[in-house]
Amino acid sequence: MAPRTLHVQVKLGGPGSGTLGWGGAGRGRGWRGRLGLLGGAAVLALLVWLPFSGHLVVREVEVVGNQYLPSERVALEAGVSPGMPLIDLKAERVRLSLLRDPWIREATVGRGLSGRVVLRVVEREPVLRVEGGDFLSDDGFLLPRLPGAAFPSLPLLRWGGSLPPPGGMVEDPALRAAVELSAGMGPWLREAAREVKVEGPERISVLAKEGWEAVLGGPDGLEAKERSLRQVLQFLKERGEVPVYIDVRAPQYPSYRLAR
C-alpha cells in the first residue's frame, strides 16, 4: 500500500486569520518560496552595490578624432569623467551635449572593456580666418577662437558685410560662395593666398602674399581657374614680368595687368 501524506491545517479565527500548513507538497512549496525571496533580495543587493563597487564605473575616458579641440574640453563638454557610474551614462544625451560645440560636426559615444568610454568626434575644418581670431568652417559655420590651438596657414576674409554669431551659419549668398571657394582651393593656392576679398557671389578675389590679385569669380570651375592662374604666373616669371592683377574668371582666356 502506498504511503499517505498527512496534511494538518490549523485555522485561527478572528480578523486577519490565516492557515498554517506543513507536510509533503506544502513543505516543498514553502522552501522554494523562501529561496526565491532570498535570491531576489540577493540580486537587488547586488544591483545596488555594483555601481559603487568600482566594477560598473567609468575608469577611462578616451577622446578620438580631435585635431583642434583639447581632449580635456571634449570630455568636460560630454560630462563624462572617471568614477562616474556607467548606469548614469546615456550615450544619446552625451552625443547631443558634444554637438552643442560648433567645432564638432559629428560625435559618437562607445563603451569599451573594463569601464572605458570612447568619445569619437569629427571636427569642422576652418577654411578662412576672420578679424578677431574666429574662423569660418568649410560648411559655413562661424567657429569661435581657440586660444593655444595650432592651425594651418589660412587666408583672412576681407568682407564688408555682417557675420553670424559664433556657432551660427552663414546665410549671405556672397559669403557662402566665398566659403565654398575657400574650401575648394588646392594646397598651392591656399598657401599663396593672404586674403580672400568678397564683393559678390561672382566677384571673389584672392590677394596673394607676393602682391598680385587673382580674380576668380565664383566657386564654379575652380580647378581650371587655379590651373590657368599658375600658367599665367609661370609665363610672366619666365619673361621677368611682375603681375599685379590676373583675371581667370574665364580660364581659357585669362588676362593680366603688369606692375609699372
Image: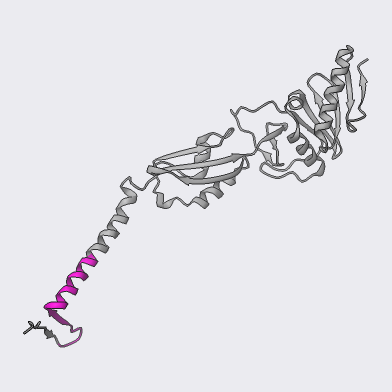
* Residue sitting at x 31%, y 55%: 48
In this view, the residue farthest toward the bottom is: 13
* Residue sitting at x 30%, y 52%: 49
Examine the structure image and report whether residue 28 is included in the region drawn in magenta. yes
Quadrant hosting residue 135: top right
Q: Position of residue 136 (x, y in %)?
A: 71, 37
Q: Position of residue 52 (x, y in %)?
A: 32, 49
* Residue sitting at x 73%, y 43%: 164
In this view, the residue farthest toward the top is: 240
Residue 203 showing in the rendered view: yes
Quadrant in which the C terminus appears: top right
* Residue sitting at x 90%, y 30%: 252
Q: Position of residue 193 (x, y in %)?
A: 77, 25
Q: How is the image coloured?
A: one colour
Instruction: Pick the residue in front: 118 or 228.
Output: 228
Examine the structure image and report whether residue 149 is included in the region drawn in magenta. no
Quadrant in which the N terminus appears: bottom left
Quadrant hosting residue 237: top right
Instruction: Pick the residue in front: 169 or 59.
Output: 59
The answer to whether residue 19 is left or right of residue 146 is left
The answer to whether residue 11 is left or right of residue 158 is left
Q: How many marks?
A: 0
Residue 205 showing in the rendered view: no
- The relative height of residue 199 versus residue 25 in the rendered view (above or below) is above
Q: Position of residue 53 (x, y in %)?
A: 30, 47
Range shown magenta: 13-37
- The relative height of residue 10 versus residue 39 in the rendered view (above or below) is below
